[in-house]
Amino acid sequence: MRNGQKTAWISRLCLSLAVLLALGSGTGAAFAAEPEEAVDEFKLVALGDSISAGYEPGADVNTVPYGYVDRLYEQALLHGRASVSNYGIVGLKSVGLKAFTEGAAAGKSLTGEEIQASLPDPRANAFGAATAQLRAELATADAAAITIGGNDVAPLLTSASSLTDDQLNTQVAAMLEQYNLNVTASIDALLAINPALRIVIADQYQPAPVLAGKDLYDKLNKATAAFTAKLDALAATYVAKGVKVEAVHVAKQFSGRESMLTYMVSKRDFHPTQAGYAVIAAAFGNVLWGSYSELAAPAAGAPMSIYVGGKQLNTPYKPVLKNSVNYVAIQDIVNAVGATTVWDSKTSTANIKFGIRTVGVKLGATTVMVDGAAVKVSSPAYMQKVGKEGKTYVPLATVAGGLGFSVVYSSKLKTVFINP
């Protein structure tokens, strides 16, 4: 896990993607071979407020969030090896993002209060103490994804209905001017750490549905449009200088669907529902990769999904979950990764070769041989009857990892991502 946080309770609440990064229950042995040569890895750092943190109403320190950043990690894994670090702070405003990123750029450790006064996030001090880790991660990152501004404009939800159009325009203009200054300073701080960093930043959706009142709805949408225009203009100033800053248009995706994509109707809370987080992820994904693939967990009782190099493994020999270990037919995984296999009938061992690596899997053995070294497995290879055939099933993570592939299991999706 790469979020820089130290304690277990912080790790659980922090959107560090622990569910996706761990090889825990449902995988093979906790084994991952290091490749002989450096491989490309897409590195994403998420920054911002509770939207980046993946917050939903009722979440506490034991909640494992599943927000837009988690979904971006899944999308990244469809394109190759990836890692994600999440520094989303609940309650953060643009002024807090400015302090946090400037602290990282200066190599200065901060307290929660120094980031922003009275932050409600119990991890604020831990985040402030992790600025060195943030700086190191940003220095090698490919992209930074940011959501910020919701807490800046939140007061409009309660005040807009009582304001005249002129008063609202004046208040929005002042708010956006301060937002512009803070976000500009934040972007400059990020670029001071990594001038080649690609920065993608979302505009701000408005969560109130039309049933809250047509007049209020129109006023809030007008303010949202002004927010989007300000962000577009800000991004354009950087693009004109050859800097990779891009606006992600989330607001238009929420328009007219506020009651489904937020909790405003059900819980009087402006945070996204799971459907809302999926929409936000798609908006970011389309900017980052030009596409977004909808992923869903298999139906109850169905075997897990497997993606190898971004392509789903489709086979009549279904994966099997046995003793909390994911197994696949040996020839399926060999074919999927482009390896070769030689069966040694004397020792009942399948020797799988990929490049300079060899993994020897013996039926019933509690170890596999990886380049001649024994690696213990929690459950051995076995013979599975499939119709009238007998198929050798092997622990997926052990074999793929032993061949030098990255193996990441998502328990949320019941999906394994394998990348060279």
Image: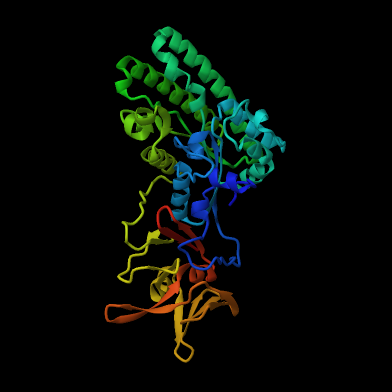
State the image quarter where residue 30 is shown.
bottom right
Residue at point 42%, 79% (across, down): 382
Which colouring convention does the figure follow? rainbow
Q: Position of residue 395 (x, y in %)?
A: 46, 71
Residue at point 56%, 65% (across, down): 32
Nearer to us in this view, 176 or 239:
176
Q: Position of residue 345 (x, y in %)?
A: 44, 90
State the image quarter where residue 369 is shown.
bottom right
Nearer to us in this view, 113 or 329:
113
Residue at point 58%, 52% (across, down): 1
Nearer to us in this view, 161 or 165:
161
The answer to whether 319 is drawn above or below residue 98 in the figure is: below
Q: Position of residue 341 (x, y in %)?
A: 45, 80
The answer to whether 154 is drawn above or below residue 331 in the figure is: above
Q: Is residue 392 visible?
A: yes
Q: Position of residue 315 (x, y in %)?
A: 32, 68
User: In the figure, is residue 212 to the left or right of 360?
Assistant: left
State the image quarter where residue 358 is shown.
bottom right
